[in-house]
Image (cartoon, rainbow, N blue to C red):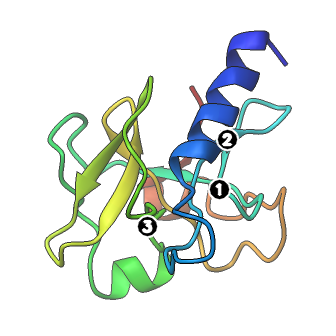
Amino acid sequence: MKLAGIALIAALALAGCGSMGTSTSKPSTPAQAADGTLIGPNGKTLYFFSKDTKGSGASACYDTCAKNWPPLDVASTAQPIGDYSIIIRTDGARQWAYQGQPLYYFVKDAKPGDKTGDGVGGNWKVAKP
């Protein structure tokens, strides 16, 4: 992994940390797998949704969509860094975006490395830089 990539991951990890012992927010920093796929803090694959408008700061995935494609949420103390930005969903939740594209998991990915959501409905694509 390139030094810049390691530095970015470290910075994102620090950005997701709250004050010791008092934070109730969960860590939510994205990273990059060895194959270039973007992954969440649980190691599972992240996806882009074709109905999202890149750079709009909004998600088009709510209700049933968001149950099947959970947004990658953001710790309350996290700040945007590099290509990673934060959008505010209509319910007030914060969601990570990569280069303006909101990031999501797929509920049918059972373990890290699964990519069963790639191509679903012609609208979902594995997130890669």
Disc 1 to disc 3, C-alpha distance: 10 Å
Identify the mark nearer the N-term, 2 or 3.
2
Task: Looking at the picture, tell me which residue is in the foreground, 92 or 52.
Answer: 92
- As displayed, is residue 17 above or below residue 54? below
Q: What is the x, y in percent for residue 8?
A: 62, 26
Disc 2: which residue: 31
Q: Which residue is mark 1?
A: 40
Identify the amino acid type marked 3: Pro
Q: Secondary structure at mark 3?
A: loop
Tell me the residue at 36%/78% (across/down). Answer: 65
- 106 with respect to 100 (left or right): right
Give the position of the N terminus as an image quadrant: top right
Label located before the other in sequence (2 or 1): 2
Closest to the observer: 90 or 52? 90
Instruction: Say whether disc 1 or disc 3 marks the residue closer to the N-terminus.
Output: 1
Question: Which quadrant of the figure contains the C terminus?
Answer: top right
Q: Do callouts 1 and 3 mark residues in contact (Cβ within 8 Å)?
A: no
Regarding residue 59, the answer to whether it shows in the image is yes
The residue under label 3 is 71
